[in-house]
Image (cartoon, grey):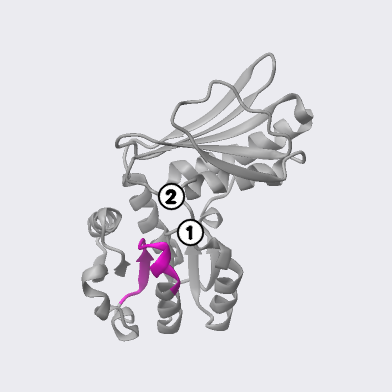
């Protein structure tokens, strides 16, 4: 399979390694130094594009891939307010898109466990309150993480007494869950070189239940993106990474 990498930072280089290990070929690598090479003709050399750039660049990259009729795996977040527009564009071009806040297999299993647990906990009303915590390296400037947003939105779907989420950047770890009424707190911490830790905590007056995923490195994200490229190569349509998994 021939792959175009749109975004060639740390993640792009890691994706390249996994792609080559799986006998794929990288035919195009785009970063800020060679943007002039990002053309429809160059994209057409690829069977699939993997997009890990920036929120500023991602919409243009999506549009170019749709015009070039190249399936695209989108790992960049920060553009989901345009999700409906992109889905419509995908239909108009009869294109192929798969997007996700996290392509790690372990994280997507975590998403499934989170949704299942939330459905169970929802039966017990407000006896338990819930909070989401995310910890990332200090170079990660945005908060909350896209993964934390996915977690919180899945909780809102399953818990009838939760309607929205609210993010705060924390400097010290919270020992107790704040009184949140219909709002789910997402607490964001930025520490050292942490690749990514996500925690869902349910707490009552008598006990606490915790669901936790800890990434040991960023390799899971890269490996999952290559798997997504393999999965989407011969498909048409608009997909979420969750469509790759069945629970």
User: Which is nearer the eye, 109 or 14?
Assistant: 14
- Residue shown at 47%/46% (left/top)? 143
Q: Quadrant of the C terminus?
A: top right
**Disc 2 packing (10 Å; few <14; some 14–19; many ≥20):** few
Relative to 137, residue 39 above or below: below
Q: Residue 71, percent across and down?
A: 43, 72
Check disc 2 and report its element: helix, strand or loop: loop
The percent position of residue 162, horizontal first and vertical second, equals 72, 41
Residue 56 left/right relative to 130: left
**At x 71% / y 33%, what residue is drawn?**
120
Q: Is residue 233 something one can see in this rendering?
A: no
At 41% across and 79% down in the image, what residue appears? 64
Q: Which residue is mark 1?
A: 78
Q: Nearer the viewer, residue 90 or 77?
A: 77
Q: CA distance from mark 2 to mark 1?
A: 9 Å
N-terminal of the two: label 2 or label 1?
1
The image quarter containing residue 18 is: bottom left
Return the x and y of residue 26 as percentages of the image width and height.
24, 68
- Magenta span includes 48: yes
Q: Which residue is mark 2?
A: 142
Q: Residues within 10 Å of mark 1 (few under 14, many from 20)?
A: some
* Front position among marks 2 and 1: 2
- Circles 2 and 1 in contact, beta carbons < 8 Å: yes
Label 1: element kind: loop
Split into 4 quadrants, where in the image is the N terminus? bottom left
Which region is colored magenta?
46-59
């Amino acid at each position: 399979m021939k792959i175009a990498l749109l975004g060639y930072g740390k993640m792009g280089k890691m994706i390249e390694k996994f792609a080559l290990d799986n006998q794929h070929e990288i035919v195009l690598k785009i970063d800020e130094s060679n943007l002039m090479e990002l053309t429809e003709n160059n994209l057409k050399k690829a069977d699939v594009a993997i997009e890990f750039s920036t929120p500023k660049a991602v919409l243009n990259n999506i549009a170019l891939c749709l015009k070039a009729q190249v399936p695209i795996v989108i790992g960049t977040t920060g553009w989901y307010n345009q999700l409906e527009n992109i889905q419509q564009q995908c239909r108009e071009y009869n294109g192929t898109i798969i997007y996700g806040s996290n392509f790690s297999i372990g994280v997507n299993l975590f998403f499934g466990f989170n949704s299942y647990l939330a459905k169970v906990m929802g039966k017990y009303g407000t006896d338990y309150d819930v909070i989401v915590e995310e910890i990332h390296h200090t170079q990660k400037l945005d908060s909350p993480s896209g993964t934390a947003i996915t977690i919180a939105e899945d909780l809102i779907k399953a818990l009838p007494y939760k309607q929205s989420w609210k993010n705060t950047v924390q400097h010290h770890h919270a020992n107790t869950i704040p009184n949140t009424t219909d709002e789910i707190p997402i607490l964001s911490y930025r520490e050292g070189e942490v690749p990514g830790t996500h925690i869902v905590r349910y707490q009552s007056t008598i006990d606490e239940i915790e669901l936790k995923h800890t990434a040991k490195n960023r390799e899971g994200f890269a490996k999952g993106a290559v798997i997504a490229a393999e999965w989407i190569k011969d498909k048409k349509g608009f997909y979420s990474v969750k469509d790759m998994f069945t629970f």
